[in-house]
Image (tube, coloured by chain):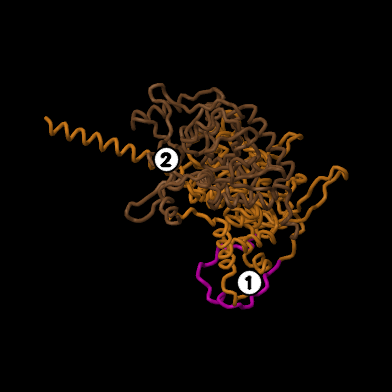
Amino acid sequence: MYVAVKGGEAAINNAHRLLADRRRGDRSLPSLTIEQIVAQLGLAVDRVMAEASLFDPSLAALAVRQSRGDLIEAIFLLRAYRTTLPRFGVSVPLDTARMQVERRVSATYKDLPGGQLLGPTFDYTHRLLDPSLLEDQDVEEPARRPAPEEEIMRVSDILAHEGLIETDGTFPDDHVAGDLTREPMEFPMPRDLRLQALARGDEGFLLALAYSTQRGFGRTHPFVGEIRIGEVELEMDVPEMGFSVSLGRIKVTECQMVNQFKGSAKAPPQFTRGYGLVFGQSERKAMSMSLVDRALRAQEFGEDIVAPAQDEEFVISHSDNVQATGFVEHLKLPHYVDFQAELALVRGMRAEIAARDTDDDMQEAAE
Amino acid sequence: MTELASYNFAYLDEQTKRMIRRAILKAIAIPGYQVPFASREMPMPYGWGTGGVQVTAAIIGPEDVLKVIDQGADDTTNAVSIRAFFQKVADVAVTTHTADATIIQTRHRIPERKLSEGQVLVYQVPIPEPLRFLEPRETETRKMHALEEYGLMHVKLYEDIARHGRISTTYAYPVKVAGRYVMDPSPTPKFDNPKMHMSEALQLFGAGREKRIYAVPPHTDVVSLDFEDHPFEIQRFEQSCALCAAHGVYLDEVVLDDKGGRMFVCSDTDNCEDRREHGHSGEMLAPSKEAAE
């Protein structure tokens, strides 16, 4: 009997209903609350905010819940919402030197002004499953230090005093920060757009690319100048008022990678930098981003482009996981019209070969 | 949070629609040229027709009648889903009848019925660049289009002939538009290519993930690339449709059992239904008709 996929609509509705059921799971257990997800799955929420380019923990938590914990799906949900929001301005650049630091480490100095501050890190935990977490046990309050009176100076500023490292660089006064969610992409890209693409790029993809540079595919001789995590003030210029006003505070992770540079005809030997900045707490992403950023600057420094991580078009075109997952997964949509065309072609070619073989056989028999 | 559910007519905000319309106008002015546009994130996945949906959203008005097909059929799940999307966000009339539609969004097929003046065919495009699989870099392919440097494409087609005795491209078969740009017709079977030539309808192509829009205005030359000694030819089916007995239409092969049993039916479901209503019946329907009598 011919089944003409009639009833596609009923099938979709039933699939959605079953999905809602599976998402909720066992009804005898309490449902997860948004507050619980924000508080207890904070790093998942951070990743969703970072790769969706929207800082809103509650909405990100809603997306995590709605997506059953599939983070790329959650990122997609949040982005599809973000795209409907008007863009009403551009903030003043974040001043991360004024960050309220929760964690700050430098691999290039044993000690430095402001100190090394481990903060909430997995780094020195022993990865042993903790049976005590099977139950809801009391957790002791964290130890706190008094807030430092001075700003914690950035390592890049320390090195800059001696002129040993490239500066932050400047943009002309009339420069408007690019936005690849509002303008079509074009290659080659200015660095601000490239950094935007990396900041919302897939953590796993950037991690793998960063790793490849360490293994010799576009080596950059990196040192972690500094990683800092904490809250920074977000400010915006209001033209009518003539000064900037605070919009609130957001948590970010910043990584400044310091890289060797032997100098060129144009510049004396100097350390160069790769930069990573991500919403929330995500050191892995910020570090990967800074390694890939530096690798992508190969052309700027006259280095040979020999590895995938140095290839701007390759990296930026494939770093977006929402695009990637969409295109990979669209293969499951029906393609039977094209497949039919291929079937006919292969059958035709096989028939031709079979006919030729028969001819040959007959000729041999005749001889 | 309650504001989450309120969206503009046809989902996109008016600024975005204006931006897309500008891209469409430019595309119509330069037939076959891929116009970059600031593709938005849509509430359906990339690869599911986000480009086509954005084009449709930008041109649709409350008076329009929309038809959506996927693989030629109105009732494939993704066509159902996109049609439902526009019913929800634009509250427009929808139809499955090709003749009644003002806008037809399609994936992989062009309707069998000849389109007429005033109709718009919106294609969903996965990879807009016809040269992409010959040269993966956008920076290079844009240059090749600018210089009208299409030798590589002819070499590819020639190599097909040298290797297989024929051009082995069966879908997304490259065409030259208005004598200038080589264009990807989207992954429609080459069977549909001749329908693009001098069509009375406006043909718009949207690629969301790749952020490109291109167009073929009505009454425009669309020529499938070929060689004098290997002229372009379309697929021909020996069978006729098992339901409506149509010849010279594109057929889907439907497997009936695990013993090699199969039948061929129209890919264009609307055309097939229309023919059956007009009394045509194929071999699969004939017995039941007799039984009824």
Q: Main secondary structure of the magenta part?
A: loop
Q: Quadrant of the C terminus of chain B?
A: bottom left
Seen at 54% across and 33% down, the residue is: B138
Instruction: Give the foreground label among 1 and 2.
Output: 2
Task: State the image coordinates of residue B185 (x, y, percent, origin top left).
Answer: 52, 34
Task: State the image coordinates of residue A266 (x, y, percent, origin top left).
Answer: 60, 29
Q: Quadrant of residue B231?
A: top left
Count of all numbered marks drawn on residues in the image: 2
| Residue A127 forms part of the magenta stretch | yes
Instruction: Check disc 1 and report the residue beneath it.
Output: A31
Secondary-structure class at tag 2: helix
Seen at 68% across and 53% down, the residue is: B88
Task: State the image coordinates of residue B168 (x, y, percent, origin top left).
Answer: 39, 34
Q: Amino acid under label 2?
A: Ala
Q: Is residue B78 above or below residue B229?
A: below
- What's drawn in magenta, residue-wise? A117-144
As drawn, the residue found furthest toward the right would be: A241
The answer to whether residue A235 is left or right of residue A80 is right
Task: State the image coordinates of residue B39 (x, y, percent, origin top left).
Answer: 64, 41
Chain drawn in brown: B
Chain drawn in orange: A
As drawn, the residue found furthest toward the front would be: B293
Mark 1 Cα shell of 10 Å, populated few (<14), some (14-19), many (≥20): few
